[in-house]
Every structure is written in C-alpha cells, then in structure tokens.
Image (cartoon, rainbow, N blue to C red):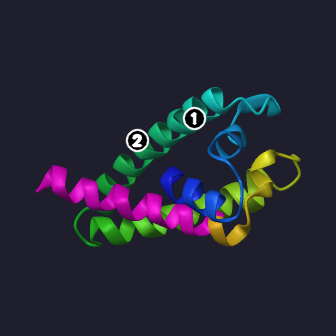
C-alpha cells in the first residue's frame, strides 16, 4: 500500500517525505512518525484480517478475502473515520486511496496463502 502511494505521489509531483508526513499523527507532517504510524495501523489491520480468515475459513480464497477486506477498510476509513476530521489523509485522491487498500488486501491475502500452505 505504502509503496503504491509513494510511487503515485512521485508521479504526481509529491516527494516521499511529504507523502509519509501525510500519515503522521496530530498533523505534524513528520515523515518518520508518519511511516511508523502507518506500520502500526497496518499491523493492527493485519491482525484483524487473520481473525476474519479464521471465521471465513476456506469458503473464500484468502486473496479474495484480502481484496474485499482492503475495500472495506477503504470505505470505513474514507467515508467513516476521516470524513469530518480534516485529516491530511484526505489529500490523497479517493482513487489512489482505494487502489492502495485493494493492493494492501490482495498482498495480505496472498502472503496469508503462502504462510498457511
């Protein structure tokens, strides 16, 4: 997810430190705290995905579950948690934010398949 957003940012003329700073808590735009905050949130979401896969079992392939999970996270984040916050994350276009979450979910599901198989 982060790699996609960094590349999309660079293609849009936004530097890596600025993109990382968007994820910084309290709006301080610090790229290091932004990177660590993003890793922490991703780890929590990853644990949630693990629990979801245990509930769903083998009825749905893990990579499909991952993509759906990524989409769910996108909609909850974009239109729920962030909608009225004025967060710097809202400066990321909805398309890039959505694609990044789908990539995150797909990679998470793909890695889960490799680990379990």
Q: Main secondary structure of the magenta part?
A: helix
Q: Kindly identify which residue carries mark 2.
A: 47
Depth check: give the residue in front, 67 or 13. 13
Residue 102 at x, y = what percent?
A: 49, 67
Q: Looking at the picture, how far across and down is residue 15, in whole percent?
A: 67, 48
Q: Are marks 1 and 2 in contact (CB under 8 Å)?
A: no
Lateral position of residue 11 relative to residue 84, left or right = left
Q: Residue at x 29, y 64 (%)?
A: 62
Disc 1 packing (10 Å; few <14; some 14–19; many ≥20): some
Q: Quadrant of residue 107?
A: bottom left
Which quadrant holds residue 90? Answer: bottom right
Residue name at image x 63 percent, y 65 percent: 11
- The residues tagged by marks 1 and 2 sit, at their Cα atoms, a distance apart of 19 Å
Q: Which residue is mark 1?
A: 35
How many numbered tags mark residues here? 2
Which span of residues is magenta-colored? 97-117
């Amino acid at each position: 997810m982060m790699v996609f957003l960094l590349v999309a940012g660079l293609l849009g003329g936004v530097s890596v430190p600025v993109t990382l700073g968007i994820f910084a808590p309290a709006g301080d735009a610090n790229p290091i705290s932004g990177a660590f905050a993003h890793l922490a949130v991703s780890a929590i979401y990853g644990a949630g995905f693990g629990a979801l896969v245990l509930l769903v079992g083998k009825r749905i392939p893990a990579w499909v579950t991952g993509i759906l999970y990524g989409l769910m996270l996108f909609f909850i984040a974009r239109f729920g948690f962030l909608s009225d916050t004025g967060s710097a994350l809202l400066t990321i276009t909805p398309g890039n934010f959505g694609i990044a979450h789908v990539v995150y979910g797909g990679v998470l599901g793909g890695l889960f398949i490799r680990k379990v198989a």
